[in-house]
Image: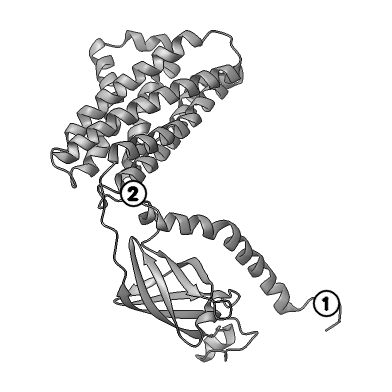
């Protein structure tokens, strides 16, 4: 091999080192925060937070890892290019966070050699060595469980109001901006402009529902930890899509919508109000008595919130105004709507759980 030619091993491992560095700097901190948050169940079925003590520094090294559980034993597989597992080569105590439970354990390390094509044909593995690749297997035997915090529903109204206000305001920013962007004349192409506009608005509404669902699940978990975040977010996003489908009909149909029978228009209005609460009720009813009141109270809350939105924005919207002003007006109305619906649904939730 020429002196200036790169080593094949170095060329092969360099991309992994770069990937490891990006994962450590960008991905791991966010995932670790998520695993310690009330929304941990989005990942904790397959990902846990592992704490290892540095062999030389004595510092705590925390990192999220994929795991498989078999009884009281957890198995973690890592690439040899990672460094954290080297602190466990002689066996060492570790701590893991599984969902909302913190447990102590003892970890041991073994090497699984890589298998080449020739070795596969002959039915044996390559002996482990510095260039053999393979993987590292960390086996963790669970020992003791740390005392878990008791779920506390105190302060639920304030926690819900704060989280839902921020979530609804952040989520509503997307349809507010998209609504202004798709209002331009370029969206009138091929005579299907209204349909494209309506589709874009509904897609933006799905984003709003997802963000709102995450915010609500974050606040709700302290009082009802049994509700799965994915279930609540799916119900909220689906309800938002239904509501935005109804809300986009004036954009798609224009004046033709007014020629529909009054009974149909009334049904559409009712769908707009109850869609989200009805789908959330399907999740909530397994965890709270008299959960159907949630449908009624959320519909009333959204009716008041939409009225507040119209009251604030109607005097400020004018034909031909700049797009940036329309966005600001929409965000102002969205903030008023967010605070209103958060406070009213929070009061309804507290009353429902007390019953």
Q: Name the residue rendered at 34%, 22% in the picture.
A: 305
- Residue at the spot 26% in from the left edge and 57% down from the top edge: 150
Name the residue carrying label 1. 5
- Disc nearer the start of the sequence (1/2): 1
Distance in Å between CA atoms under marks 1 and 2: 52 Å
| Rendering coords of residue 56 (x, y %) | 58, 80
As drawn, the label of residue 89 is: none
> Would you say 196 lies left or right of 320 here?
left
Measured as percent of width and height from the top left, residue 71 is found at: 29, 76
Q: Is residue 230 left or right of residue 200?
A: left
Crowd tier of the residue under label 1, counting other residues whose Cα lies within 10 Å: few below 14, some 14–19, many 20 or above: few
Residue 201 spot, x, y in % from top left: 47, 27
Question: Under tag 1, what secondary structure?
Answer: loop
Residue at coordinates 64% horizontally, 86% vertically from top-left? 130
Hey, which quadrant is residue 326 in on the image?
top right
Left or right: where does residue 103 sit relative to residue 352?
Answer: right
């Amino acid at each position: 091999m020429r002196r200036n030619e790169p080593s094949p091993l170095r060329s092969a491992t360099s991309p992994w080192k770069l990937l490891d560095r990006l994962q450590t700097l960008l991905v791991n901190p966010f995932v670790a925060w998520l695993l310690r948050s009330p929304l941990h169940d989005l990942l904790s079925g397959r990902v846990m937070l592992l704490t290892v003590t540095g062999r030389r520094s004595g510092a705590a090294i925390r990192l999220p890892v994929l795991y498989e559980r078999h009884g009281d034993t957890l198995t973690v597989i890592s690439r040899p290019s990672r460094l954290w597992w080297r602190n466990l080569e002689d066996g060492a105590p570790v701590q893991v966070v599984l969902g909302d439970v913190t447990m102590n354990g003892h970890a041991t390390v073994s090497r699984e050699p890589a298998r080449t094509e020739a070795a596969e044909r002959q039915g044996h593995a390559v002996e482990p060595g510095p260039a053999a690749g393979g993987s590292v297997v960390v086996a963790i035997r669970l020992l003791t469980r740390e005392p878990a915090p008791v779920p506390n529903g105190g302060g639920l109204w304030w926690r819900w109001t704060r989280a839902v206000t921020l979530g609804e305001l952040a989520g509503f920013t997307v349809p507010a901006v998209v609504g202004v962007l798709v209002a331009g004349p370029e969206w009138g192409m091929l005579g299907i402009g209204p349909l494209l506009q309506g589709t874009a608005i509904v897609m933006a509404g799905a984003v709003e529902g997802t963000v709102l669902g995450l915010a609500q699940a974050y606040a709700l978990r302290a009082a009802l930890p049994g509700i799965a975040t994915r279930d609540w977010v799916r119900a909220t996003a689906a309800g938002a899509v239904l509501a935005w489908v109804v809300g986009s009909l004036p954009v798609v149909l224009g004046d033709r919508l007014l020629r529909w029978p009054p009974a149909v228009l009334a049904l559409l209005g009712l769908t707009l109000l109850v869609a989200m609460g009805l789908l959330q009720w399907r999740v909530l009813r397994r965890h709270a008595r008299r959960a159907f009141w949630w449908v009624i109270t959320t519909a009333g809350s959204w009716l008041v919130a939409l009225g507040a939105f119209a009251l604030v924005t109607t005097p400020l919207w004018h034909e031909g105004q700049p797009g940036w002003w329309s966005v600001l007006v929409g965000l102002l109305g969205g903030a008023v709507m967010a605070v209103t619906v958060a406070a009213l649904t929070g009061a309804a939730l507290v009353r429902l759980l007390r019953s």
